[in-house]
């Protein structure tokens, strides 16, 4: 059974600080990793994708992947109140008969 | 370039009825996946269509069925609605299979009473 685990939170972070969101997954065969942001009542929005070990930076966001530890994280620098949302970690195993499996999400609250 | 669009945005149905939800994929995308998201949960994979063929299915009963059309738009059909089917139904399109990025439509909020 392929699973993606996240702490449900809420994670409270002061404005301007770094928010760190973590995710573990169950299967070493995983190929593609994604972070989605979901505001309340809205659909998920893709913010980062990462495919190889190491760090990938995009603006204030950095995704980190460690396949040996089956661990992927998202760092948000200079957190803003608008970053308050649920962050969904998603994993794809890259086969033809594939699907993206989502974690339950971590609720992030940026404190003004 | 148009994004993923879903219709309707909200729907109220009675237990036992049937419902059809629609999705237009993003231009250039040939793969559509459907997800069910209950309140406070992550999206749960229902099934995926690639070039009009079902390409994978999650743990949903056969009363959940789908179609993909030659223009890659898609439908999700649910028969014999149950109260637990109340959820946000999400369609995601991607340019292929094998781990490519998926982009979601705005979702359809289904309420079964």
Image: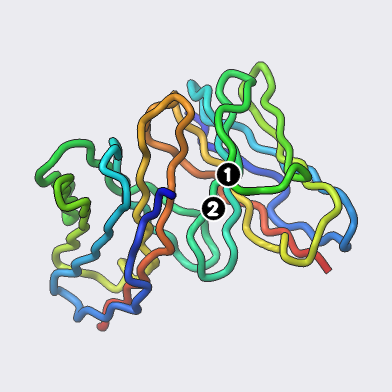
Residue A21 rendering spot, x and y as whole percentages: 24, 65
Q: Are marks 1 and 2 on the same chain?
A: yes
Q: How many C-alpha atoms fall within 10 Å of the one at disc 2: few (<14), some, or many (≥20)?
A: many
Q: How many C-alpha atoms fall within 10 Å of the one at disc 1: few (<14), some, or many (≥20)?
A: some
Foreground: B52 or A3?
A3
Taking the spot 21% from the left edge, 54% from the top edge, the residue there is A71
Residue ID for mark 1:
B58
Element carrying mark 2: strand
Taking the spot 27% from the left edge, 42% from the top edge, the residue there is A49
Taking the spot 50% from the left edge, 44% from the top edge, the residue there is B104
Foreground: A66 or B89?
A66
- Coloration mode: rainbow
- Contact flag, marks 1 and 2 (Cβ < 8 Å): yes
Numbered circle sitting on residue B44: 2
Q: Is residue B42 left or right of residue B25?
A: left
Q: Is residue A98 left or right of residue B70?
A: left
Residue A93 rendering spot, x and y as whole percentages: 36, 36
Tell us which disc is closer to us: 1 or 2. Answer: 1
Q: Is residue A18 left or right of residue B33?
A: left
Residue B84 rendering spot, x and y as whole percentages: 72, 65
Chain name for mark 2:
B
Corner quadrant of residue B46: top right
Taking the spot 15% from the left edge, 67% from the top edge, the residue there is A78
In the rendered view, would you say B5 is above or below A5? Answer: above
Placement of the C terminus of chain B among the 4 image quadrants: bottom right
Looking at the image, the residue that sits furthest to the front is A1
Corner quadrant of residue A79: bottom left
Element carrying mark 1: loop
Chain name for mark 1:
B
Residue A3 rendering spot, x and y as whole percentages: 39, 54
């Amino acid at each position: 059974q392929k699973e993606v685990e996240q702490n449900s939170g809420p994670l409270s972070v002061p404005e301007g600080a770094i928010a760190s969101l973590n995710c573990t997954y169950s299967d070493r065969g995983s190929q593609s990793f994604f972070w989605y942001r979901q505001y309340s009542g809205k659909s998920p929005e893709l913010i980062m994708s990462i495919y190889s070990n190491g760090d990938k930076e995009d603006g204030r966001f950095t995704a980190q992947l460690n396949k040996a530890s089956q661990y992927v994280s998202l760092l948000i620098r200079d957190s803003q109140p608008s970053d308050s949302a649920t962050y969904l970690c998603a994993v794809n195993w890259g086969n033809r008969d594939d699907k993206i499996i989502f974690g339950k999400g971590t609720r992030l609250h940026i404190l003004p | 370039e148009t994004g993923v669009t879903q219709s309707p945005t909200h729907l109220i149905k009675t237990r036992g009825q049937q419902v059809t939800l629609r999705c237009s994929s993003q231009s250039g995308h040939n793969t559509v996946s459907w997800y069910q998201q209950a309140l406070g949960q992550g999206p749960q994979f229902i099934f995926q269509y690639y070039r009009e063929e079902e390409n994978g299915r999650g743990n949903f009963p056969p009363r959940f069925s789908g179609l993909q059309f030659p223009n890659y738009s898609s439908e999700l059909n649910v028969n014999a609605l149950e109260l637990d089917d109340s959820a946000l139904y999400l369609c995601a399109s991607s340019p292929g299979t094998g781990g490519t990025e998926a982009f979601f439509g705005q979702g359809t909020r289904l309420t079964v009473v």
